[in-house]
Image (spheres, grey):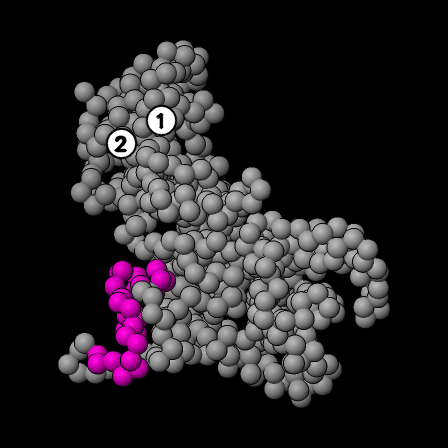
C-alpha cells in the first residue's frame, strides 16, 4: 500500500489499478526546502520525494524513490516502474501543471535506476537509456569534471579545460584541426555503480558484451518497457538483446580506459573554520557494487578495494559561501546534511581476485564531485588528483598530530601496559611504530599467514615477522627462521645487511603451485636487531619513545628532538 501525503485532511481513499492507495490525513511533509516527501508505503518500505520543497509542483518534476533495506522491490525494475505508475492520478489531480517527470531510485544511498514519464504518454514510466554519444555542439560551458582527466591528470581531447565559447564555430587552438571527440560530461546514472562495472568489463573483454546473460541484464535494467512488452516472444527478445549489446558497446566506447564511476550518499559535518571545509567521513576502504542480475559469468557483487577513498575528507568553501549554503539547507531548525559523492576510479583489470560470483578489484581514486541532491545536476565541489593528494597529506598530518598528543598523554600508562605484554606483542608494536599502541597486535604466525594467502589464490596478506636472514642483499633474501620465506625490499635502494635477526613488516604471497614453495614477502619496514632474537626490541620505554618520535616527525615534517 502506497500512502500519499499530497493531500490535506479530508482526503478519501480510492483504488488505483486494483491496489489500495490510502491517502494520509496529514499535510505535505517537507524534509528540506529542496525536497518534499509526497508519498510513502510502510508495507512496501518506500518513500517518494520531490525536488523543490513546498514548490515541488512544476512542469518538470524531479522525483527520488527511496527503497529501504527491508523493501522487497529492491533490484526489481519492473516492480519499481509499477510503483511509480500508481502515482499518475496524483500528478493529474494534485499537480495539473506537470508535463514530465524524472525519477531516480535510491538503494543504500546508491542510485540504481532512472525513469522518465510524460503526461502525453499517460504518465507511464520507462527506463532512461543514455545516448550513445554527445555532439560537440552540445558541450557544457563548465570546466570538465575530475573524471574528464586522463590518468596523468591532463585533459583528454574533446574535454576542454576552459569554458566553451557561445559561438558554435569556435576556432581550435591547434594549427592542425583534429577530428572532433565527444564531450566528456557527468556520466549518466546508467553508467554508474554496477552498470559502470558492466561497461568496464566489456571494454576490457569484448566477448563479455556478447554474453546473452549480460545483454539480458542490461535490457532489463535499461530497456524495461521494450523487454516486458516482448513477453515470451523469442524473436522480439532476441532483437532487444542485440540492441542491448550495441548500446553497451556504444556506452563503453565513450568511457575512459579502466574507469568506473560510483556514487554514495553520506552526510557532511559542521564547518571547520580552521581548514575552511565541510568535513566528510568515508568509512572503510571497500566499495561494493551490487547488482540484481544472475547468470553465467556475471558477478552479483563487485567489491572495489580503494585504500585512498578515505582521502575524501571534505569539500572546501569560503566562510561566507558556507553560511549561505547552510541557510539554504536549513528548514525550521533542522539542517539537511545529506549529500551525494560521485567518484571516478581507475581500476586495474589484472587485479581481479575471487570467484565468478564475486570478483574483487583494486582501484585508485582519480576524482570526485559533491552534490546537494540525488539528481546530481550541479556540483557543489569538484576535486582532481592534485586536490586529492593535498587532502591526503593534510589528513595524515592531522592524524599524526592527534596520535602524538594521545601518546604523550598516555605515555606512562602505556609503558606499564607494554611491560605486562608478552614479547611478540612488544615486537609487533616496535616494528609498527607508526601506529598507536595495540596490545592485541602480535607478530604473525607464518603458517597461518601462508594459509590465508593460499585461501585467496596466493594474494598478498599483510604481516609482521621475526626473521633470521641467511644472507644479504635487496631481493630474494633467504631466511633460516622461519624458513621457506624469501624477503625483498619494497624500496629499490634498501638492502638487508649481514645475516642476522630482523623485525619485518609487509605483505606475504604464497605460490599456489609446487610442493611447499617458499613464500615471498615484500618488506616495507625492517629493523636490524642488535641482540639475538631481537631482545632489544622488547623494551617498553623504547617502544613508546619510538612511537612518539614517529608521530612527531609525521606531524611536523621534521625529526623529533
Q: Is residue 33 visible?
A: yes
Q: Label 1: how many residues lie within 10 Å, few (<14), some (14-19) or many (20+)?
A: many
Q: Return the x and y of residue 278 as percentages of the image width and height.
A: 40, 42
Left or right: 560 as drawn, with respect to 445: left
The residue shown at (82%, 55%) is 10
Give the residue number, with chain letter if any, for mark 2.
Answer: 554
Q: In the rendered structure, which disc, 2 or 1, sits on the residue that comes first in sequence?
A: 1
268 or 74, nearer to the observer: 268
Q: Return the x and y of residue 44 as percentages of the image width and height.
A: 74, 56
92 or 214, nearer to the observer: 92
First to last magenta residue range: 145-172
358 or 187, nearer to the observer: 187
Secondary structure of the residue carrying tag 2 is helix
Q: CA distance from mark 2 to mark 1?
A: 10 Å
Q: Return the x and y of residue 456 as percentages of the image width and height.
A: 49, 49
The residue shown at (21%, 23%) is 560
Secondary structure of the residue carrying tag 1 is helix
Amino acid at each position: 500500500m502506497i500512502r500519499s501525503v499530497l493531500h490535506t485532511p479530508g482526503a478519501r481513499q480510492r483504488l488505483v489499478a486494483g491496489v489500495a492507495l490510502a491517502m494520509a490525513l496529514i499535510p505535505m511533509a517537507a524534509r528540506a526546502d529542496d525536497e518534499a516527501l509526497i508519498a510513502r508505503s510502510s508495507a512496501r518500505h518506500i518513500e517518494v520525494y520531490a525536488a523543490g520543497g513546498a514548490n515541488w509542483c512544476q512542469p518538470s518534476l524531479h522525483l527520488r524513490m527511496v527503497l529501504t533495506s527491508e523493501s522487497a522491490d529492491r533490484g526489481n525494475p519492473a516492480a519499481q516502474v509499477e510503483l511509480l505508475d500508481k502515482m499518475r492520478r496524483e500528478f493529474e489531480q494534485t499537480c495539473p501543471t506537470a508535463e514530465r517527470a524524472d525519477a531516480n531510485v535510491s538503494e543504500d544511498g546508491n542510485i540504481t535506476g532512472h525513469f522518465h514519464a510524460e503526461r502525453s504518454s499517460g504518465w507511464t514510466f520507462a527506463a532512461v537509456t543514455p545516448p550513445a554519444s554527445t555532439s560537440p555542439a552540445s558541450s557544457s560551458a563548465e570546466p570538465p569534471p575530475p573524471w574528464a582527466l586522463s590518468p596523468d591528470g591532463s585533459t583528454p581531447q574533446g574535454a576542454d579545460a576552459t569554458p566553451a565559447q557561445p559561438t558554435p564555430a569556435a576556432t581550435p587552438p591547434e594549427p592542425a584541426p583534429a577530428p572532433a571527440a565527444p564531450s566528456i560530461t557527468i556520466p549518466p546514472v546508467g553508467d554508474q555503480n554496477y552498470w559502470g562495472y558492466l561497461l568496464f568489463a566489456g571494454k576490457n573483454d569484448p566477448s563479455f558484451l556478447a554474453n546473452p546473460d549480460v545483454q539480458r541484464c542490461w535490457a532489463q535494467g535499461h530497456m524495461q518497457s521494450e523487454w516486458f512488452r516482448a513477453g515470451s516472444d523469442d524473436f522480439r527478445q532476441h532483437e532487444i538483446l542485440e540492441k542491448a549489446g550495441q548500446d553497451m558497446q556504444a556506452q563503453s566506447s565513450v568511457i575512459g580506459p579502466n574507469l568506473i564511476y560510483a556514487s554514495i550518499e553520506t552526510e557532511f559535518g559542521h564547518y571547520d573554520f580552521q581548514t575552511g571545509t565541510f568535513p566528510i567521513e568515508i568509512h572503510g576502504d571497500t566499495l561494493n557494487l551490487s547488482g540484481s542480475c544472475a547468470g553465467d559469468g556475471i558477478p552479483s557483487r563487485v567489491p572495489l578495494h580503494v585504500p585512498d577513498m578515505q582521502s575524501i575528507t571534505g569539500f572546501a568553501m569560503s566562510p561566507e559561501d558556507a553560511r549561505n549554503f547552510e541557510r539554504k539547507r536549513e528548514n525550521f531548525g533542522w539542517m539537511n546534511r545529506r549529500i551525494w559523492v560521485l567518484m571516478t576510479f581507475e581500476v586495474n583489470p589484472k587485479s581481479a581476485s575471487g570467484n565468478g560470483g564475486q570478483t574483487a578489484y583494486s582501484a585508485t581514486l582519480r576524482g570526485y564531485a559533491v552534490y546537494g541532491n540525488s539528481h546530481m545536476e550541479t556540483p557543489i565541489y569538484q576535486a582532481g588528483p592534485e586536490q586529492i593528494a593535498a587532502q591526503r597529506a593534510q589528513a595524515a598530518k592531522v592524524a599524526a598530530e592527534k596520535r602524538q598528543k594521545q601518546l604523550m598523554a598516555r605515555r606512562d600508562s602505556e609503558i606499564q601496559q607494554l611491560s605486562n605484554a608478552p614479547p611478540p606483542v612488544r615486537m609487533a608494536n616496535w616494528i609498527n611504530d607508526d601506529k598507536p599502541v595495540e596490545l592485541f597486535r602480535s607478530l604473525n604466525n607464518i603458517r597461518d599467514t601462508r594459509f590465508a594467502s593460499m585461501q585467496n589464490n596466493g594474494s598478498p596478506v599483510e604481516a609482521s615477522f621475526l626473521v633470521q636472514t641467511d644472507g644479504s642483499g635487496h631481493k630474494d633474501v633467504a631466511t633460516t627462521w622461519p624458513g621457506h620465506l624469501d624477503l625483498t625490499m619494497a624500496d629499490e635502494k634498501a638492502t638487508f645487511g649481514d645475516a642476522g635477526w630482523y623485525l619485518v613488516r609487509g605483505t606475504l604471497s604464497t605460490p599456489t603451485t609446487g610442493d611447499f614453495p617458499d613464500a615471498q614477502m615484500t618488506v616495507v619496514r625492517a629493523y636490524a636487531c642488535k641482540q639475538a632474537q631481537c631482545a632489544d626490541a622488547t623494551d617498553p620505554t623504547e617502544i613508546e619513545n619510538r612511537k612518539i618520535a614517529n608521530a612527531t616527525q609525521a606531524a611536523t615534517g621534521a625529526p623529533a628532538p
